[in-house]
Amino acid sequence: MARNYPIEKVRDIGIIAHIDAGKTTVTERILFYTGVSHKIGEVHEGDTVMDWMEQERERGITITSAATTCFWIPTYRDGDKDFEHRINIIDTPGHIDFTVEVKRSLRVLDGAVVVFDGVAGVEPQSETNWHYADEYKVPRICFINKLDRTGASLEKSFQSILDRLTPNAILLQIPIGLEGAFEGVIDLLTMKAYRFEGKLGENVIEEEIPENLKKEATERRHTLIEKIVEGDDALMDIYLGGKEPDLQSLKKALRRATIDNTIVPVLCGSALKNKGVQLVLDAILDYLPAPSDLPPTKGLNPKTHKDEERRPDDNEPLAALAFKIATDPFVGTLTFFRIYSGTMKRGSYVMNTTKGSKERISRILRMHANHREEAEEIYAGDLGALVGLKDTTTGDTLADPDHQLVLERITFPEPVISVRIEPKTKVDQEKMGVALKRLSDEDPTFKISGDPDTGETIISGMGELHLEIIVDRMKREFKVGANVGRPQVAYRETIKSTAEAEGKYIRQSGGRGQYGHVWLRVEPLERSKGFEFVSAIKGGIIPQEYIPAVEKGIREAISKGILAGYPLVDIKATLYDGSFHDVDSSEIAFKIAAAMAFQEGSRRAKLVLLEPIMKVQVIAPPDFLGDVTGDISSKRGKIKSMDERGNIRVVDANVPLAEMFGYSTNLRSMTQGRGSFNMEFSHYEEVPQNVATDIIEGKKQ
Ligand code: GDP
């Protein structure tokens, strides 16, 4: 079986937006137009449009899938299948507490359409997501939506992109009219006007630019072309020679620049009023990369521990990444994956190289807007969902068993907040275990642990809202009755200097004794480096068989904490000396000795407490600015910047999470309901001494 779409005709993209900017509406329109175009391409029926709409109304368009496949033939190709592309849309969530989900999707998509509200322009969350996309070097196009709304301004929205996101943005279109008079768009490359007719704007009409906009369009085109030729020597020569490069060359150069992230094309329209979305689809094909445009994927060969590369090619060994686990009411657990190289076949075995276990590929599904399709094979650059995997969780690699590779993991921040939950009855207790396991399989930022002292269950996550949603799902979907405690900050402990310590666990009074003896050095590591263990033992001073026990002893001590019972982080422990006894030494003796040495060493190395610091952005009218900033300062917060945005003020600050509980109520009363805020985890910082003492003592009571 061969693939229907060459890899050059595949796009793996996401639609990213601030909540309410119109992501759902844009996606619905995309699925509608692509559904129509695909059907027209297949059957050439005049009334397909209406059929499709009727069916969709009955079923409700499914756009909740983690990856939805659709097909698009560029406008003005008259349903010619040769030009048809496959577009896989990877879902990205809107709410700030789920930016980690955005990150997860950015890892597997190749390009993104960023949607803005044409009245509000760049909003706080667009900034956060934009920076994540920078981190993953994701090529982007922008779509300024809602130009039909009162107060919409292409100019202001575009300027806010330039000021706050990137100076590389450039207008590819301008609107015909605005607000109530918004009619269509002008494409500055083709220098044509486009209107959208039919019930849902499905008929795209190309026409001459209206007389009154010709001057503006010509000037804007000038800027656009200068920007494009800047990055292309050959085109620059033509341009400097007084000629204009042809359309195809300009498009090609713009495509290259967009993929290189040196230009971000900006489009505009109104999804709700059915204007402009088809041109966004054209732009996805024209300017966003195919999987084959990207460099090979890197990974680690688990056998040789060397880096290896895989090209996006069907004939390379299989390397795929599981990026989302979802529960489907009809088929059970779905594992969404992206193939970076090779081909995955139904009925074959693959290796989960992250876990070291084999998985059988029993069913491969492709999710479409209104149906799912069983696939026999799925190829490099494509996405799909697997049914019935046993062991695979988010971030795992699935690879050819004969050519194993572990792809770079998606890194997730550690949870910063936790609550205790207590099942109401014995039955609830059993159900709770199943529910929590299922929810944590789906969500890598949600962790479950037990309090060793009380046996209670503790759940941890990225914010109050995150945990509230999880508890709510547990109650609603899994019908678990439970009492939930107050949220607690996930503090950490760490050391500030280097120290050495000895640990001896020796019991030799008759019979077989115990003998474990180690010397450890502990050193601080950079923030978020976690824990590192090194054995520098030479010449069998301690036999090799006991060394894993030493590491285990240290890890246990780390998880228990020393100062106030919080786990230690960012620490390196080196085992460099010790001794053993032929008869009395045992793993357990070395484990205990190592834990003792580690605790002693850490105490000598200036133990401190760390707390999560949140990046907080508050938006409020100017009248309340003083109260808002005063309150942030009283919360040990540091104000980073204050901006004016029209007639509101935006305050960016870093504030300890411990001070932010209940802030939404607090802010509401402080601003008479007119302020809003969002926050996300930024980093861990040392807790000031006076505060730390309270925490440590509180904990010790
Ligand atoms: P999401 O939260 O980003 O998914 O945004 P939605 O697509 O749900 O849109 C949020 C609100 O804005 C809804 O009430 C939409 O009907 C409305 N909306 C979306 N696109 C447009 C548009 O182009 N113009 C106008 N006036 N409203 C829009």
Image (spheres, rainbow, N blue to C red):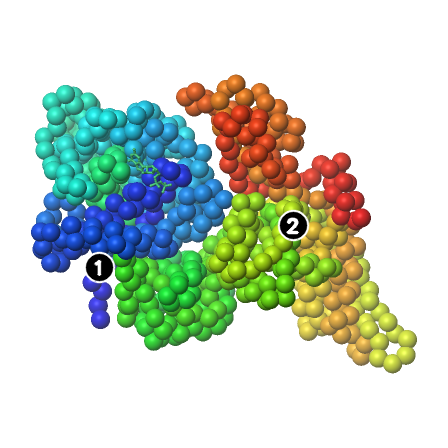
Looking at the rendering, the quadrant in which ligand 1 lies is: top left
Q: Which residue is mark 2?
A: 485
Q: Which of the 4 image quadrants contains residue 172?
A: top left
- Horizontal side of 687 relative to 272 (left or right) equals right
The residue that appears at 53% across and 38% down in the rendered structure is: 679
Quadrant in which residue 506 is drawn: bottom right
Crowdedness of circle 2 by 10 Å Cα count: few (<14), some, many (20+)? few
Q: Is residue 291 left or right of residue 322?
A: left
> In the image, residue 611 lies at what x, y percent?
65, 42
In the depicted structure, whether residue 184 falls above or below residue 354: above
* Residue contact between numbered discs 1 and 2, judged by CB atoms under 8 Å: no
Residue 394 locus on image (x, y percent): 46, 59
Image point 68% across, 59% down: which residue?
Answer: 456
Amino acid type of the residue that numbered disc 1 sits on in the rendered structure: Pro
Q: Position of residue 304 (x, y in %)?
A: 49, 68
Query: Spatial distance from mark 1 to mark 2, Cα to Cα?
Result: 54 Å
Extreme residue toward the top, this view = 623
Q: Is residue 425 left or right of 677 when viewed as pictured? A: right
Residue 600, picture quadrant: bottom right
Q: Name the quarter where the N terminus is drawn.
A: bottom left
Q: Is residue 490 above or below residue 430?
A: above
Give the residue type at disc 2. Answer: Gly
Residue tagged by mark 1? 6
Q: Secondary structure at mark 1?
A: loop
Tell me the element at label 2.
loop
Total number of numbered labels?
Answer: 2
Can the viewer see residue 659 in this picture?
A: yes
